[in-house]
């Protein structure tokens, strides 16, 4: 594979685009938000400037990678790509509309992947006339750094498509697991969301401070970030969305979003500020 189409220029779309360019792919990226792709490429350039300053990359390498990042101005730009990765907002209808558009322009047999972190791959695949070519490629934030990609099969995904995804992941320098059954949260978020929820419930109950809950998990379990900081890093709005979706699908209290999370999101704390919201939560220290 040589040329990848990325739909979305938020945190995940930007991270995946940058990763793909670093690994030698030509990247064509699209976002409906004016200026989003330009900002995404500027951020990649800024990271590479830092790497050049730190002696981890040459200026020539930086320029080469930067030239591989291009913006798509309409859907026809995806006529000649080898794979597509969609990484837009976690709203099923939005993803379905995108896959319908892709179905109209992308040649048959091209890998069509969604980076959804919980939604049904089968439902997204059914928006196309080629559900066998569609699967989930779930990256983790920050995409250029995290080692894993979850490959998620929809009900009709073919073995050939899974093999193509594995080959692509390898070219991107990643390890993979294959999620055989299209279930909400796949494998990693099915484990992660109850961890977040338990940490938030302990905070609500006053079992320990936010700092100590995070420190306990960091030092006691060797996680690089405590769960409250990580929940913030992944985006509190995203976490709430994933929990609500999993709760609706499983009807299981393990996935019931804690009030503290709902209130923080309602108050506009959408995260990415290293535990800011939770660390201010009153607790009986
Ligand atoms: N893009 C590109 N590179 C990045 C980056 C980014 N956004 N953030 C960090 N890096 C790079 C740095 O440049 C640095 O590279 P070098 O070693 O070459 O210098 C390296 O990563 C380490 O970065 P830092 O030294 O700044 O920071 P750190 O050592 O504290 O690591 C971290 C930062 C990688 C984020 C680490 O704290 C970590 O692994 N945290 C856990 C992240 C995690 O669990 N992510 C999964 C979330 S769940 C999810 O995404 C899925 C979902 O559906 C909710």
Image (cartoon, grey):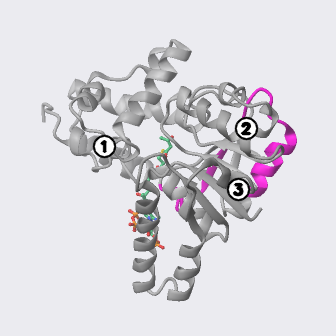
Taking the view exactly as shown, the residue that stands out farthest to the top is 251
Label 3 Cα crowd, 10 Å radius (few <14 / some 14-19 / many 20+): many
The numbered dot on residue 169 is: 3
The earlier-in-sequence mark between 1 and 3 is 3
Q: For mark 1, give the secondary structure.
A: loop
The CA span between labels 1 and 3 is: 28 Å
Q: Is residue 199 above or below residue 223?
A: above
Q: Nearer the viewer, residue 50 or 280?
A: 50
Residue at horizontal 44%, vertical 47%? Answer: 221
Q: For mark 2, give the secondary structure.
A: helix
Q: Quadrant of ligand 1?
A: bottom left
The earlier-in-sequence mark between 2 and 1 is 2
**Circle 2 is placed at which residue position?**
103
Residue at horizontal 21%, vertical 38%? Answer: 209
Residue 240, given in percent of the width and then of the height, sits at: 39, 29
The numbered dot on residue 210 is: none
Label 2 Cα crowd, 10 Å radius (few <14 / some 14-19 / many 20+): some
């Amino acid at each position: 594979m040589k040329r990848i189409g990325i739909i979305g220029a938020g945190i995940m779309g930007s991270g995946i685009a940058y990763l793909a360019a670093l690994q030698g792919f030509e990247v064509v990226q699209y976002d409906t938000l004016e200026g989003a792709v330009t900002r995404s490429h500027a951020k990649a350039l800024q990271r590479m400037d830092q790497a050049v300053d730190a002696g981890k990359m040459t200026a020539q390498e930086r320029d080469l990678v930067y030239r591989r990042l291009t913006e798509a101005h309409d859907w026809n730009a995806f006529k000649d790509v080898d794979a597509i990765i969609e990484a837009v907002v976690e709203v099923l209808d939005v993803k379905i509309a995108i896959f319908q558009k892709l179905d109209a322009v992308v040649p048959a047999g091209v890998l069509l992947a969604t980076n959804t972190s919980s939604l049904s791959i089968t439902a997204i695949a059914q928006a196309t006339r080629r559900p066998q070519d569609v699967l989930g490629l779930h990256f983790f934030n920050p995409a250029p750094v995290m080692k894993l990609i979850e490959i998620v099969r929809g009900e009709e995904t073919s073995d050939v498509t899974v093999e193509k995804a594995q080959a692509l992941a390898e070219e991107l320098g990643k390890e993979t697991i294959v999620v055989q059954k299209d279930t909400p949260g796949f494998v990693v978020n099915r484990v992660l969301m109850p961890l977040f929820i338990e940490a938030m419930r302990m905070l609500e109950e006053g079992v320990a401070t936010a700092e100590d809950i995070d420190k306990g998990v960091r030092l006691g379990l060797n996680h690089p970030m405590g769960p409250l900081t990580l929940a913030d890093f992944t985006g509190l709005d995203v976490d709430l969305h994933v929990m609500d979706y999993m709760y609706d699908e499983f009807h299981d209290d393990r996935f019931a979003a804690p009030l503290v999370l709902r209130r923080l999101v309602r108050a506009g704390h959408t995260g990415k500020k290293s535990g800011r919201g939770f660390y201010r939560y009153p607790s009986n220290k």
